[in-house]
Image (cartoon, helix red, strand yellow):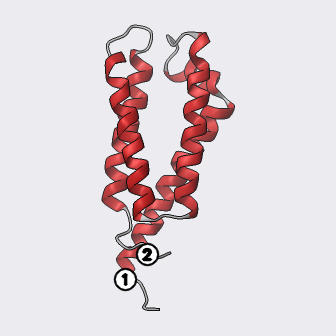
Amino acid sequence: MTPRPASDRVRRLLTRAMALAGASTGIALLTRPQQVVDALAPALPHDRVWLVRALGARLLVQHGTVVVAPRPALVRLGSAVDLLHAASMVPFVASPRYGRAARISGGLAATYAAVALAVAPRSESR
């Protein structure tokens, strides 16, 4: 087994740190959805808070997987899912009720996707 270049180790560390932040966000959305909505997007209707919880579950699974196995293929898959999520928010950005939540959620997803791809490890090895 040949040693990995230092840059790949740094990329894995950065990828895991970002994934930990994403998983932590997922935990917050999953366990405290109303508090997050009240703080960030209070116009979101109360009967739609379940969507916040569902997003939290998705983030926890997606980013938790990358924490455990920060492989380029998983980062690419997660980035694709984040870009799909960001695109799904576009129709709602001008909505008085859903706009703020859509801009925050979609913007964070698009940003994460881009940064994750930029710092992802280049090799598939652990």
| Residue 90: assigned label | none
Residue 39 percent coordinates (x, y): 55, 22
Residue 124 percent coordinates (x, y): 42, 72
**Label 2 sits on what residue type?**
Arg
Q: Residue at x 41, y 61 (%)?
A: 73
Secondary structure beneath label 2:
helix
Position of 100 with respect to 44 (left or right) is: left
Q: Residue at x 37, y 45 (%)?
A: 80
Quadrant in the rendering for residue 85: top left
**Label 1 sits on what residue type?**
Pro
Residue 79 percent coordinates (x, y): 38, 48
| Residue 9: assigned label | 2
Secondary structure beneath label 1:
loop
Q: Gap between marks 1 and 2, in whole Å?
A: 7 Å
Position of 105 with respect to 122 (left or right) is: right
Q: Is residue 35 above or below residue 58?
A: above
| Residue 5: assigned label | 1
Q: Residue at x 41, y 51 (%)?
A: 77
Q: Nearer the viewer, residue 44 or 51?
A: 51
Instruction: Tell me the crowding category of disc 1: few under 14, some 14 to 19, or many 20 or more residues within 10 angstroms, Cα based.
Output: few
Position of 15 with respect to 30 (left or right) is: left
In the displayed image of the protein, which residue is found farthest to the right? 31
Quadrant in the rendering for residue 76: bottom left
Residue 3 percent coordinates (x, y): 43, 89
Quadrant in the rendering for residue 84: top left
Q: Is residue 33 above or below residue 123?
A: above
The image shows a total of numbered marks equal to 2
Query: Do callouts 1 and 2 mark residues in contact (Cβ within 8 Å)?
Result: yes
